[in-house]
Image (tube, rainbow, N blue to C red):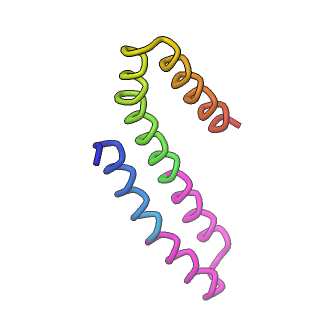
Amino acid sequence: MKEGKAKALKKLKIVRGQMDGVIKMLEEDRYCVDISTQLLAMIGQIKKANIDILNDHLKTCVTDAVRSNKEDGEEKINEIITVIDKYIK
């Protein structure tokens, strides 16, 4: 497994644990702001995991495609641009 994917996996496992905690907080009818704070922490971890995946993709797949074939390289770059556009919105 590539380093970026391993880092993302670790973050997502943390999020899985946080999700269980948030579900328990909801079941216990805990304070809304506390629940929201935990949800925001989860969102932050998911965004960081996504960045790890994209960094890994840029360093490997995109770099290899650019070096080997102009059309493949352009296609990979356009894929990244599409993802970034979705990330920003």
Q: Which residues are magenta?
A: 17-44
Residue at 62% across / 87% down in the picture?
27
Q: Is residue 52 above or below residue 82?
A: below
Q: Residue furthest top?
A: 70
Residue at 39% across / 56% down in the picture?
11
Q: For the stretch drawn in magenta, what is the main secondary structure? A: helix
Looking at the image, which is closer to me, 45 or 71?
71
Residue at 60% across / 35% down in the picture?
83
Q: Position of residue 64 (x, y in %)?
A: 36, 22
- The image quarter containing residue 88 is top right
| Callout count | 0
Q: Which quadrant does the C terminus fall into?
A: top right
Does residue 63 appear to the left or right of 85 in the view shown? Answer: left
Looking at the image, which is closer to me, 49 or 29?
49
Q: Position of residue 73 (x, y in %)?
A: 48, 18
Q: Position of residue 24 (x, y in %)?
A: 55, 83
Q: Is residue 24 above or below residue 77?
A: below
Q: Is residue 35 above or below residue 68?
A: below
- The image quarter containing residue 12 is bottom left
Please check the rendered image and state whether residue 32 is part of the magenta-colored stretch, yes or no: yes
Q: Position of residue 13 (x, y in %)?
A: 40, 64
Q: Residue furthest right?
A: 89
- The image quarter containing residue 43 is bottom right
Q: Is residue 41 above or below residue 60?
A: below
Please check the rendered image and state whether residue 22 is part of the magenta-colored stretch, yes or no: yes
Residue at 48% across / 69% down in the picture?
18
Does residue 83 appear to the left or right of 12 in the view shown? Answer: right
